[in-house]
Structures are given as structure tokens and as C-alpha cells.
Image: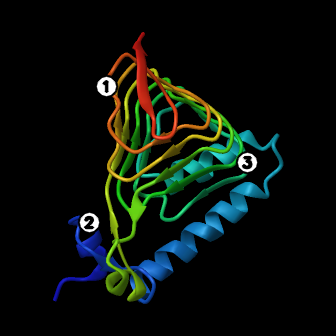
């Protein structure tokens, strides 16, 4: 029998609400996030230690401002020189990969989880997860929402308030809801 976690990893519909394994993993992650968010801002060494232990991969140089929230942690990978400002949320049911030199402004969300449009499936608590990939040298403005399955190429700027629901090619300035390429950089 295929577990709900395996279904999730395969991109299939799965039930995260009633699965003991997924619930336990989310609870453990929330405890780590709670610990992280309640450290003094000056406790940079301990903060880095928690993130390095929580995430699947980190570079050597990174800073994630408090508060920060994620669902599992182990599905998040950050490159070198990563910075996320306050109120960053990563729903990492699927992989979320950030390249090198990525800067994330306040109040941004990266959401790999989605729900089916079929009301019966949705009411049964089913969801799906699609990975998010952010390239190198990307700046993401304040209040940006990145949706499941999106890839943002290298050397992009995503304007504040954008809802990114499709891939953004490398070297683009993109803004809006829905987010669209305005010009090449």
C-alpha cells in the first residue's frame, strides 16, 4: 500500500489531514519554527543552527528574519547568500529550491500545496503538491505569492504584490496579478 507521503512525493492527490506520519512531521517542524521565532534576534549562531538542521540543504551564508514558518522544512533548499525578510512562509509539501544570491522581501509566501477544483475531492481533504524552483540572483519584492509548480529563472526581479502562477524566464522583470514579464533585464 502506498503511503500518503509517497503519494505526495509522486505528485498525486493525498490526504495530509488524517495521516499520522505527515501530522507528526508537521508538528515537529512547527516546534522547531516556534523555537526559532522565539530566539533573540542577536542569537544568530543558534538561529543558523536551527535552520541548517531543519532545511534539506543550506549554503554557508544565509539569514532568515523572524518570524518564519514552514510545514516540513526538509523539502527546502537554499543556496549561498540567501536572505528572507520577516514573515516568510514556505509550505514545503514538495521541494522548494532557492538558488544563490536570492533576496526575499517581507511577507512573501511560497506555496507548493494546492487543492483540487472538484468539490468532492476537496471536501475529503485531498491536496496535491508541486515543486517551486527559484534561480540564482533573484530578488522577490514584498508581498509576493508564488504558487505550486512555478519556476523563476536566474537574474529575475519579481515586483511587489505579484501572484506568480506561471514560470518566469531568466533575466526578466515580472509584476502583477497574475505576474507577467514586463521587460528583459
From this view, report whether residue 111 is shown above or below residue 138. Answer: below
Q: Nearer the viewer, residue 19 or 184?
A: 184
Question: Left or right: where does residue 34 sit relative to residue 39?
Answer: left
Question: Left or right: where does residue 127 sit relative to residue 6?
Answer: right
Residue located 20% across and 66% down the image: 10
Q: Nearer the viewer, residue 38 or 141?
A: 141
User: Hey, which residue is sitting farthest left in the picture?
Assistant: 1
Disc 1 versus disc 2: nearer the observer = 1
Q: Earlier in the sequence, mark 2 or mark 3?
A: 2
* Residue annotated with mark 2: 9
* Residue annotated with mark 3: 66
From this view, report whether residue 102 is shown above or below residue 39. Answer: above
Q: Percent position (x, y) of residue 111?
A: 47, 55
Q: Nearer the viewer, residue 96 or 78?
A: 96
User: Hey, which residue is sitting farthest top in the picture?
Assistant: 185
Disc 1 versus disc 3: nearer the observer = 1
Q: Earlier in the sequence, mark 1 or mark 3?
A: 3
* Residue annotated with mark 1: 169
Amino acid at each position: 500500500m502506498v503511503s500518503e507521503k509517497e503519494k505526495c512525493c509522486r505528485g498525486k492527490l493525498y490526504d495530509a489531514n488524517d495521516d499520522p506520519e505527515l501530522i507528526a512531521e508537521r508538528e515537529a517542524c512547527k516546534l522547531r519554527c516556534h523555537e526559532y521565532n522565539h530566539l533573540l534576534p542577536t542569537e544568530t549562531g543558534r538561529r543558523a543552527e536551527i535552520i541548517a538542521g531543519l532545511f534539506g540543504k543550506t549554503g554557508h551564508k544565509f539569514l532568515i528574519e523572524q518570524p518564519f514558518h514552514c510545514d516540513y522544512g526538509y523539502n527546502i533548499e537554499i543556496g549561498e547568500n540567501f536572505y528572507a525578510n520577516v514573515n516568510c512562509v514556505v509550505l514545503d509539501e514538495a521541494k522548494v529550491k532557492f538558488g544563490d544570491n536570492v533576496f526575499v522581501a517581507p511577507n512573501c509566501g511560497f506555496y507548493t500545496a494546492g487543492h483540487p477544483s472538484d468539490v468532492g475531492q476537496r471536501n475529503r481533504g485531498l491536496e496535491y503538491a508541486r515543486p517551486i524552483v527559484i534561480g540564482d540572483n533573484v530578488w522577490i519584492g514584498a508581498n509576493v505569492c508564488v504558487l505550486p509548480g512555478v519556476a523563476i529563472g536566474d537574474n529575475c526581479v519579481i515586483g511587489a504584490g505579484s501572484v506568480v502562477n506561471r514560470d518566469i524566464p531568466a533575466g526578466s522583470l515580472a509584476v502583477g496579478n497574475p505576474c507577467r514579464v514586463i521587460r528583459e533585464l
